[in-house]
Amino acid sequence: MTAPGVHEDVRDRPPVTERRLHPVTPLRRAWAPVAVLIGWALHDPDQAQRQLTRLTTTSLLIGLAVLLPAAALYGFLTWWFTHFAVTASELRIRTGLLFRRTAHIRLERIQAIDVTQPLLARVAGVAKLRLDVIGTDKKDELAFLGAGEARALRAELLARAAGFAPETAHEVGEAPSREMLRVPPGVLAVSLLLTGATWGWLLGAAVMVPLLWTATHSLWTVLAAAVPLFGAAGASSVGRFVAEYDWTLGESPDGLRIDHGLLDRAHETVPPGRVQTVRLIEPLLWRRRGWVRVELDVAGSSNSLLLPVAPRELAESVVARVLPGVSVPPREALVPPPRRARWCVPVWWRGYGLTVTDAVFAARHGLLRRSLSLVPHAKVQSVRLVQGPWQRARGVADVHVDTGANKSVTARLRDAGEAAALLRSQAERSRTGRRDARPDRWMT
């Protein structure tokens, strides 16, 4: 909108140059028709098998002669009709072969931009840009761009989001990064071997397979039960090792940089000021080694892992960088629930604890797998007191604090009087915390 008496000449606006994705992109898009056929075959394998047995060699060759060119044409057309452009205020993405879709992404609403390179993309020298935008659950993406072009575009978008003028955003480049730590592959492998989830799935398979075979003598029944169990064990061990391999954490003016992956490399950024909750997780078998895992809740972002494994002292120093002015409370500072809470949750009540400092609301839960959640007062959106009938009888209550990442942290089984006082005081802490909070901006 222009001021009264002022006429904006559209000829004065800088031209918008639309660009296409990398030429290898049609190869990725061409797999869509083939994937539909594979999905149909997996959905009804008996029908697919009957149809395949009816095919002759000639009809099979004719089908391939039609399917492969059609898939190639589909991949080419979807690439041809996909454009993107960076304007003074937004990233514009136009897609669609039959039904056109234009996404207008406001630059000031961009929270994070990740660069990912699956294995084949690394071989081809291309990369994928994934954008976290405020108010959207699904990430928009540009796949694929040349690896150099993807990094240059990421740097330009972050510079624009930080408030740099369009004519100087190209010159800013990617902010320099200082490496803070790197997780050795040996430490990562040992930490996964000491994780109870892997052994739990394997134990479940070792128990279920003989029982099912004894009861049914059906190989298909045994495979139907064993494959998911062994798959879950592999995902919690080998899968995590491949995904978290060479985990590197760096610090830059636009946030904390994370690089990881053995086959698929990912370059992620933890946005400054958008972290709502930090969790320090201690599995039982890690405690003698002093290791912890650090997870995050980030508003407007799906990035949730900061450190797969690290010494506790080093992890606490990283938390201090993520949440300036916050220190992790010592174990002795966490006040357990009153002893009468054992009638509500036998045994496990000992794993709960709470402390509230000038900076954070800190709640712990778990005996075998301890988890300490830290919520800065400025990030608390609402506070709730919940008390069931059995809790009322024992004089205890739960206090929930809700954050901007649509998540909650709960202080379980607190004394009812303490919970009521905490409800009132937390509201005041949150109000003053938001007033004094640092701005959620890039490169500040």
Image (cartoon, rainbow, N blue to C red):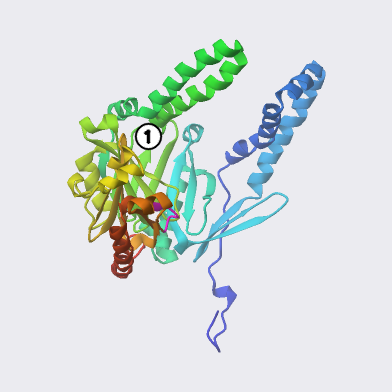
Closer-to-camera residue (176/118): 118
Residue for point 26% across, 31% down: 286
Image quadrant holding the C terminus, namely bottom left
User: Given the current orientation, which residue lies at the most extreme bottom position?
Assistant: 5
Left or right: residue 248 compared with residue 407 = left
Residue 216 coordinates in the image, percent (x, y): 60, 13
User: Given the current orientation, which residue lies at the most extreme front position?
Assistant: 393
Image quadrant holding the N terminus, namely bottom right
Left or right: residue 425 compared with residue 146 = left
Residue for point 45% across, 22% down: 204
Residue 405: say if magenta: yes
Residue 417: say if magenta: no
Closer-to-camera residue (409/77): 409
Closer-to-camera residue (62/190): 190
Q: Against 123, is 382 above or below?
A: below
Amino acid at circle 1: Glu
Q: Which residues are magenta?
A: 404-410
Q: Residues within 10 Å of mark 1 (few under 14, many from 20)?
A: many
Q: To which quarter of the image does residue 241 belong?
A: top left
Closer-to-camera residue (80/384): 384
- Give the labeled residue for mark 1: 244
- Number of numbered callouts drawn: 1
